Amino acid sequence: MDDTRKLRSTGTGPDWDVDGTDPFDVARLVPGFRPPPLTEETAAAAAAADARMRHWRDPAGGPLVPGSARHADATCRMFLETFNPYRPAVLDWPELVPAVRERIVALPIWDIAVRTEGKARLRMAAYAGTLRDPGMRTALALNAWEEQRHKEVLARLVAAYGIDLAPEPPPPLPRDREWAYLVTGYSECIDSFFAFGLFALARQSGLFPPELVDTFEPVMQEECRHILLFANWAAWHRARLSPWRRLRFEARVAAVWCFLAWERIGLARAVDAPGSAHAQDNNFTLHGAQSVADGGVELRGLLALCLAENDRRFAGYDERLQRPATMPRLARLALRLAGLFGRKR
Ligand SMILES: [Fe+2]
Ligand SMILES: [Fe+2]
């Protein structure tokens, strides 16, 4: 029997579980990886860890040329040194008044969010296990481990507020690990860009208790670190390829973007179809403004907010590291075109 068929879902639990063990555990998929120690948090330690995760600079001067050993080293140290050792178990789930609880339960994201975190963990760990560079392998494995922690945070939220999840089918181990990692990485670049803006909108709207927004803040910043790591891994990886392998890689990246565009358009149609009002929305980040702000928000305003939040979240990291560029570029282009044609939507 293969690993996929041996699994059973724990429903709202954080893990796939077979006799108390997890066959897709990051430490199993990535030889040599050990989960980092977590701290018993005091308020002061939590505040220090939170500040540390948002700022990082390589003390050595000089450029970080993509593909160089220095660039790889700085990328990996950035990721490890900004790790926030919080325990999901200590997160606070504030009491909610019934109207707020209902609004949260009704968000069409919970199944897809829990599944996405589990799939990201698996795909990142599967790819990390193929890497020969020990620094990159450890950084990507830690990223995978953090996705598992995100899943645990969501599982705890779901349990705290009585949200029903659909039974979770076991995620298969990807056959093409590089492709799966590229899909996950670029997917995070798209979703995080919109999530940064929607998260700020949720905070500004006052529709959600500030304590609940605060609980998710470290998760949001972790996604910023994740796509920062991904952008630098991609730059490092492509710079080290021979011309032919580079050509093949660029073709794969283009195919990934086409796949993600098709997936998002397809899912948007599925969610908009009559009778599918309760469908889970994998495209929430593209049209979720109505759910986090009264009356929604004008598209131009949302894009501007996403851009501002994107810049703010990345501002604390060494400017010599690469940044995810495609989504900010597309958003700036859309804003310029909207300005040219004077359209509001
Ligand atoms: Fe995540
Ligand atoms: Fe992530």
Image: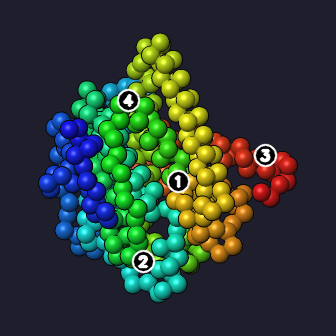
Report the residue at 44% width, 23% height from top. 239
- Colour scheme of the picture: rainbow
Task: Please report contact status of discs 1 and 4: CB closer than 8 Å, yes or no.
Answer: no
Residue identifier under label 2: 211
| Crowd around label 1: few <14 · some 14–19 · many ≥20 (10 Å) | many
> Could you give the CA–CA distance between mark 3 and mark 1, rounded to whole angstroms?
27 Å
When asked about the image quadrant of residue 272, the answer is bottom right
Task: Answer yes or no: is residue 155 visible.
Answer: yes
Residue identifier under label 1: 282
Mark 2 vs mark 1, foreground winner is 1
> Could you give the CA–CA distance between mark 3 and mark 2, rounded to whole angstroms?
38 Å
- Classify mark 3: helix, strand or loop: helix
> Could you give the CA–CA distance between mark 1 and mark 4, rounded to whole angstroms?
23 Å
On screen, residue 305 above or below 327: below
Residue identifier under label 4: 176
Residue identifier under label 3: 337
Amino acid type, residue under disc 2 in the picture: Glu
When asked about the image quadrant of residue 78, the answer is top left
Amino acid type, residue under disc 3 in the picture: Leu
| Crowd around label 3: few <14 · some 14–19 · many ≥20 (10 Å) | few
On screen, residue 309 above or below 293: above
- Classify mark 1: helix, strand or loop: loop
Q: Position of residue 192 (x, y in %)?
A: 50, 52
Amino acid type, residue under disc 1 in the picture: Asn
Extreme residue toward the right, this view:
341
Instruction: Tell me which numbered mark, 3 or 4, is placed earlier along the sequence.
Output: 4
In this picture, residue 130 sits left or right of residue 232: left
Report the residue at 25% width, 69% height from top. 89
> Could you give the CA–CA distance between mark 2 and mark 1, rounded to whole angstroms?
26 Å
Amino acid type, residue under disc 4 in the picture: Asp
Report the residue at 56% width, 43% height from top. 263
